[in-house]
Image (spheres, rainbow, N blue to C red):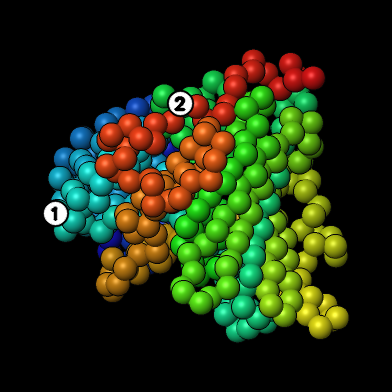
Amino acid sequence: MLKVGIVGLGFISHENVLGYIGANDARIVSVCDPDRQRASDWLEKWGMQDATWYPSLEEMLGGEPLDLVEVLTPHYLHCEHVLKCAEAGVRGISVQKPMAVGLRECDQMIGACRNAGSILRVYENYIFYPVYQRAKELVLSGEIGKPISLRIHTMAGVRRGAVWPHFWDPDGQLTKFERSGNSPMIGDDGLHKFELATWLMQKPIQRIGAWIDPDTPLDAPAYLRLKFETECGEPSQYGQLDFNFSSKLDIPSDLWLDDFVEIFGEHGVMWVHQCAAAGERNLFAGNEMSNSGLFPPIVVYRGGKVRTYLHELKPESRNWSSSFVACTRHFLDVLQNGGEPVCTGGEGKQLNRYAIAALLSAQEERDVDVSEITTAAESAGRIRLHTNFCRSVSKVGSES
C-alpha cells in the first residue's frame, strides 16, 4: 500500500483526491496546508479524518515515510517543494503544471529527482479524458486520414455580478507575473492545450506566432499559430490555439471555461465538443450543452457522410473529473509496476518552453522558434519576459 501525502489543499486538490478514493493500492495518510481549519474541513469532506495534518512540508516529510507526494501549491513554490521531497527520498513526486517558474528551476527539479532516484511527473490530466482518448484512437486508425491541421478553442467567461474564479482572480497569484512567472490562460490552462495538440498531432511544436490582447483582464483574446516539426519530405502540419474571454459570457457553472477541438485530415474532419465543462456534476449544474443533440462528444465528416461517436458514454464518464481519476491511477501503476509516467519532468519543461515562446512572440511581435527557448538563453536574459498581458480590475461589474 503506497503512502500518499498532499501538500496544498486549494481548489484543484478536490479533483486530485478523486483518484485515491477507492484505490486499493494507495492511501492518503497526511496532508499539508498552513490553514488548519481548511485542512480539517477538507479531511472531513473526503472522509479522511484518520490522515494527519501538518502545517508545513518539512513537518509532513518528517512525520512518516511517504511513497508519493502530490505538490498542489502555488507555482513559485513548486521547485522548493519538489526539491524537499526528493531530498527526503520520496519515490514518486507529482507536481501541478506549470512545473516551475522558469527553465532553470525545471532543470533543478529534474536533476534533484534523478539524483535521488525519485520519479517526477507533471500532472497532465487532459489526455486521460475519455473523449480525447477515443478521438486519438480514431486519428490513429486513419478515420480522417493523416492530420494536416488542428484547432483548439477555449472559451471563458464570468457573468456579470459573479465571483471571479480563484484562478482568474485579478488579485490572485496566477495573474501576478512576479509571483507566477507566467499567465493564467496561455501559461497555465494553455499548457493543457499544448500537450493536447502535440499528443493528437504526434509531433512537437517547432515555431509559435502569437497575438495577445493587452487590454483585457486576462491574457485573452489570444490567437496562437503553431508549426509542428516534420521530417524531410513530409508535408507541413499546423495548429491554432484560440483563447477567448468575456466578462459578460454567461456559462452557468462554477467552472468558467470550455474547450472545443477540430482536427482537419487528408480525408475528413473531426470535431470534439467540450472537455472541462462537460458531463453531469454539481460543478456544471445548469450547463445544458452536454445534453444537447447539437454537441455529441465526437463528430466526423468524411466522404459526404457524418458519423457521431460516444453516444453511449455515461455523463459521469464524460465529465472532467474522470480524467483526474485516470491520471492518478496511471501514476500509481507506474510506481507499483514500473514504466515511465505520462508527462515526465522533461516533458513538463517542454510545455513551459511553449508557453514562454508564445508570450515572447506576442511581446516582441514576431514568430519565435522553440529552439530559442533554452535555460542558457534565460540565464543570459535573451528571453526576458516583462508582461503576462493581464491587467487588474477591481470587480467584474466595473467592466463596461
Q: Position of residue 73 (x, y in %)?
A: 38, 37
Determine whether 222 is above or below 270 in the image: above
Q: Position of residue 137 (x, y in %)?
A: 58, 78
Nearest the viewer among 59 and 201 is 201
Relative to 90, 206 lies left or right: right
Please tell me which residue is depicted at 41% across the width and 24% down the height of the picture: 178
Nearest the viewer among 192 and 47 is 192
Relative to 386, 236 lies left or right: right
Which label sits on residue 386? 2
**Quarter of the figure with the N terminus:** bottom left
Under mark 1, the amino acid is Asn
Q: Tag 2: Cα neighbours inside 10 Å, few (<14), some, or many (≥20)?
A: few
The reply to whether residue 106 is in sight is yes
Of the residues tagged 1 and 2, which is closer to the observer?
Answer: 2
Q: Position of residue 294 (x, y in %)?
A: 85, 62
Q: Tag 1: Cα neighbours inside 10 Å, few (<14), some, or many (≥20)?
A: few
Nearest the viewer among 223 and 254 is 223
The reply to whether residue 186 is in sight is no
SS at circle 1? helix
Marks 1 and 2, the one that precedes in the sequence: 1
Relative to 10, 390 lies left or right: right
According to the picture, the residue beneath numbered tag 1 turns out to be 115
SS at circle 2? loop
Q: Would you say the residues marked 1 and 2 are in contact, meaning their CB atoms lie under 8 Å apart?
A: no
Please tell me which residue is depicted at 53% across the width and 75% down the height of the picture: 234
Number of marks in the image?
2
